[in-house]
Image: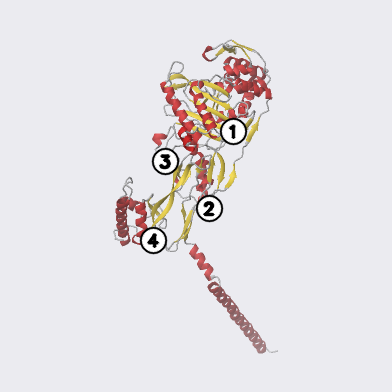
Amino acid sequence: MTQQQNHEKEELSNKRRFSFRLNFFFFSSFIIFSIIIIRLAVLQFVEGPELAQQESGSVTKNIPLLPVRGSILDSTGEVKLAYSEPIQSLYITLYKNYSKPTDGSVNPNHEEALEMAERLAEVFEKYKDPDAETLTAADIEKAMDLNYRQTHGYTPRLIKSNLSEKEIAYFLQHKKEFPGVSVIEETVRKYDEDTVAVQAIGYLKTFKTSKTLEKYKQIDETNKDQTEPGLVYSELESVGVDGLEMQYQDELRGKAGYSQIPINPLNLPEEGTVIQAPEKGKDIVSTINKDIQVETEQAIMDQLDWLHRNPVSGKLHPNATTGYAVAMEVDTGNIVAMASMPDYDPNDEWDYDKIKYIYRNGTTESYPPDDSRRRMESTVLLGSTIKPLSVLIGLKEGLFSTNTAYQDVGYALFGRDDSRVRNSQNHVYGLLFPDTAIKHSSNAFMVDMVGEKLYNKFGSKGIDIWDQHMKEFGLGVETGVDLPREFKGQIEYKNEKETALSRLAFASFGQQGKYTTMQLAQYTTMLANKGKRLEPHLVKEIRDSEGNVVKKIEPKVLNEVDFADEYWNTVHRGMSTNVDMAFSGFPYDFARKTGTSQQDIFYNGTKNRIDNGVFIAFAPRNNPKLAVAVVIPEGGFGSSSAAPIARKIFDAYDKVYGLDGVPKGNPQDPEEISQNE
């Protein structure tokens, strides 16, 4: 084959390869363009509507509508101690750009908004209630937030709350004259006008100002990631920050509603808002009975007044300005009354300076009633009310028996330096037994037979033995009551600056531990039911918005102690302190113990020794129904300061429920009886 023929064959081969590549290129291009065309068709005709909907949803904002808070009812389920009252409020939504230009030009919309503010002010002035404050055009302009300094353009602005009936009627009739203005129903929190257990019920603040509390701090952190609009908290929403309002915040709140507002590229709302109404919160049925609570509160205030005017043990008690009481059912743990007096009216405008010493709950917290610390804290030493437990400990630890005799000479000596503890008023009681030592409140018996013997048997570990028993009876631990910020007490017998013997000696008659009135009531209940530490609670059931019970709070035993029945009987017999003046004519046999705890306080560099009145009791003695604890700081002897209050609480309970199970009610008026006949 010649060279020319070879060249021709190679050229032909190259042409064929080029033709193949060219055909492959065109074929590939055809396939690619076909795929693109098909995909465009799918996007337009199949996925187009869905994508359009997604695009629309991407510019829809959810604006929370405040939830309707549930009520807090008294034990009858009828009396509302806290409730949400509907009010009408005026809001405006900015559907235009009403902002004032920063370059000095004129925005007609801004001028229109200013004109609307003037007209709104005129309407408010003409139709407002006589006692309502004047709302000026400047106030309204500020509330409108035309330059979007406070919030987004699509967020409705609150202009005025609690509209009068005339204002409501006017704006409903002239809605078209005020673009973006709407009347919306909201609620305002109200409380029983008789100020029933206000420190236990608690109060509300805005979510914005409550984020220092751990509960709302956590909610705030998860708010932005919350996918369910009803669980989103708005900044101006009212939330519970104390008492039952806080403890049952989740149940009472319900769910927020929301407005789904379409937003344009200018971040302004458009027509087509969809509204989801709020879900009303649940109602809380409290264990507090209004009648018993009101009687308890009045009894404390009457007794404080009496102590200011009548000398006890030769002197008046002008510094007795506060009082605390808790009444707890022995079988259920229900708190039927708890009073921290004086109290305040939660329906009044919040004035911290006015109520700062009384707004907290002194039955569960410890705090000084004033800044000078001249007055006592609400948590005090128990004094002689600890003696029933002191004797129980002595019996349980084998320090003596129920029939051990003791010769009381009026004082006890202990330690190397013969430290001396005297009986109150230097009384010498002579021959005593464990029960009569409680009855006569012998300090000497407690020191010699409990404190010193506990040390002799266990050495410094006697402190741990004492501490174990205290905590088993709820002293020095939380009671479990359904209220926030419960105080555990101040355990002073653990202070190692003093000898173990000294601490045990003073603890044995009530001078080494400060506890709340709630702890004292739980301890008294445990004495009454012979060893079951019941969890105190202020709520007995939770109802939905239709009135159906969704949860019942059942009695709960936190722990039990195992003491011989003869020990309990000895202590019950001993709880017979003389309080005849306060309980004259009381129709039931009842167990009781008075206490007068002495404490030193310093004021202007001077040490002052004061007496706190303390009293515990349960009735009836053999079939206990109710346990009561009362504390009157700086009230003097418990028999004269605290016992009269307890008597009135027992009487009130007897009327409503009956200490024997038969409610006594109020005797009918003779005239009413004759009319019925």
For badge 2, the amino acid type reads Gln
Give the mark nearest the N terminus, 3 or 1.
3
Label 3 – label 1 distance at C-alpha: 36 Å
Residue assigned mark 1: 661
Total tally of numbered discs in the picture:
4
User: In front: 639, or 97?
Assistant: 639
Tell me the mark number nearer the camera, choosing from 2 and 4: 4
Secondary structure found at label 2:
loop
Tell me the mark number nearer the camera, choosing from 2 and 3: 3
Label 2 – label 1 distance at C-alpha: 51 Å
Tell me the mark number nearer the camera, choosing from 3 and 1: 1
Label 4 – label 3 distance at C-alpha: 37 Å
Give the mark nearest the N terminus, 2 or 3.
2
- Vertical side of 252 occupied by 496: above or below: above
For badge 4, the amino acid type reads Tyr
- Vertical side of 162 occupied by 95: above or below: below
Residue assigned mark 4: 95
Mark 3: few/some/many CA within 10 Å (<14, 14-19, 20+): few
Label 4 – label 1 distance at C-alpha: 66 Å
For badge 1, the amino acid type reads Gly
Colour pattern of the rendering: secondary structure
Mark sitting on residue 37: none
Secondary structure found at label 1:
loop
Tell me the mark number nearer the camera, choosing from 4 and 3: 3
Mark sitting on residue 347: 3
